[in-house]
């Protein structure tokens, strides 16, 4: 007499409902932790949280320039793979290259530019959230400043796509040497190029923003969150870049007043 076998999957489901519930709980907890980390906005200096920064960067993203090479600051360029195009480098008048993907996406080096009179600095940084890119902030900022100011050169900051590693290093340069708050620095770059740094890099930029404000004893020119969960969200989403920064500065004044009152109390 033939024996009917039950489907293995159904038997496992029936015998181990707790296992499925535990797996679902782990997924939910993991998602919650990821979102909570992005929304962590604890700051004495109104530093926007990672989620707010990401929202600002993707707002009207289709209107942001999408070129292989963009001049995002006077004599400072960001590019994707253009560091290997010698003809283009020569036409642009590039004198120095800061490769943020040395050995990790853009495989060039000093010898590659022999005969072009181009100086080369390579930083080995992988584009992963857990990578410590902050250790290169000062070095990259010092390099860009000395090359642009002291040598009156043109600097190409290169990475594989030109949207994460290179963008973060240029933003750090603007924060350190041009006294920009994190949002202003990122939006300055974004007006010239579509960028989208990974979560970990943005978190490290937030820490730089806190450090710069703490060391200089100044408050960041930024509103903690442009995209507050409020009734006027639709109106805020229609703001252009200049309006966003202006709104952040107004919020700064409000926060200064509140902190002053707390001190007096």
Image (spheres, rainbow, N blue to C red):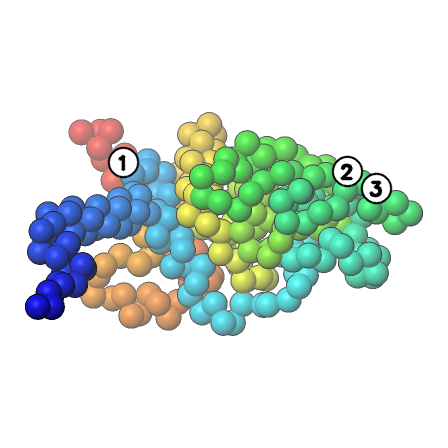
Tag 3 residue: 111
- Between 172 and 204, which is closer to the camera in this rendering? 204
Q: Is residue 78 left or right of residue 196?
A: right
Q: Tell me which corner region of the image, top left, top right, bottom left or bottom right, holds residue 204.
A: top left
Q: Is residue 189 left or right of residue 150?
A: left
Considering only order in the chain, which callout, 2 or 3, is on the residue closer to the N terminus?
A: 3
Residue 254 seen in the figure: no
Residue 176 x %, y %: 56, 37
Q: Residue at x 33, y 65 (%)?
A: 236
Considering only order in the chain, which callout, 1 or 3, is on the residue closer to the N terminus?
A: 3
Residue 157 x %, y %: 67, 49
Q: Residue at x 56, y 47 (%)?
A: 165
Q: Is residue 65 left or right of residue 3?
A: right
Considering only order in the chain, which callout, 1 or 2, is on the residue closer to the N terminus?
A: 2
Question: For numbered disc 2, what is the local secondary structure?
Answer: helix
Residue 263 seen in the figure: yes
- Residue 46 against residue 215 in the figure, above or below: below
Q: CA distance from mark 3 to mark 2?
A: 24 Å
Q: CA distance from mark 3 to mark 1?
A: 55 Å
Tag 2 residue: 150
Tag 1 residue: 259
Question: For numbered disc 3, what is the local secondary structure?
Answer: helix
Q: CA distance from mark 2 to mark 1?
A: 40 Å
- Between 97 and 76, which is closer to the camera in this rendering? 97
- Between 239 and 69, which is closer to the camera in this rendering? 69
């Amino acid at each position: 007499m033939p024996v009917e076998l039950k489907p293995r999957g159904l038997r496992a489901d029936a015998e181990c409902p707790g296992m499925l519930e535990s797996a679902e709980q782990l997924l939910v907890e993991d998602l919650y932790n990821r979102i909570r980390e992005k929304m962590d906005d604890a700051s004495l200096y109104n530093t926007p949280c990672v989620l707010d920064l990401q929202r600002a960067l993707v707002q009207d993203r289709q209107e942001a320039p999408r070129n292989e090479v963009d001049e995002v600051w006077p004599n400072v360029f960001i590019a994707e793979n253009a560091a290997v195009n010698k003809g283009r480098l020569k036409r642009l008048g590039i004198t120095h290259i800061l490769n943020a993907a040395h050995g990790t996406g853009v495989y060039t080096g000093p010898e590659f530019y022999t005969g072009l009179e181009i100086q080369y600095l390579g930083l080995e940084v992988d584009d992963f959230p857990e990578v410590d890119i902050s250790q290169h902030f000062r070095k990259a900022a010092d390099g860009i400043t000395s090359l642009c100011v002291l040598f009156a050169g043109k600097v190409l900051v290169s990475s594989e796509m030109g949207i994460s590693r290179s963008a973060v290093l240029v933003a750090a340069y603007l924060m350190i040497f041009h006294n920009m708050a994190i949002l202003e620095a990122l939006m300055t770059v974004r007006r010239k190029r579509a960028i989208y740094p990974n979560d970990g890099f943005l978190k490290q930029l937030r820490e730089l923003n806190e450090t710069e404000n703490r060391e200089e004893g100044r408050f960041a020119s930024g509103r903690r969150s442009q995209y507050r969960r409020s009734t006027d969200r639709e109106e805020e989403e229609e703001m252009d870049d200049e309006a966003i920064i202006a709104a952040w500065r107004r919020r700064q004044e409000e926060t200064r007043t509140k902190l002053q009152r707390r001190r007096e109390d």
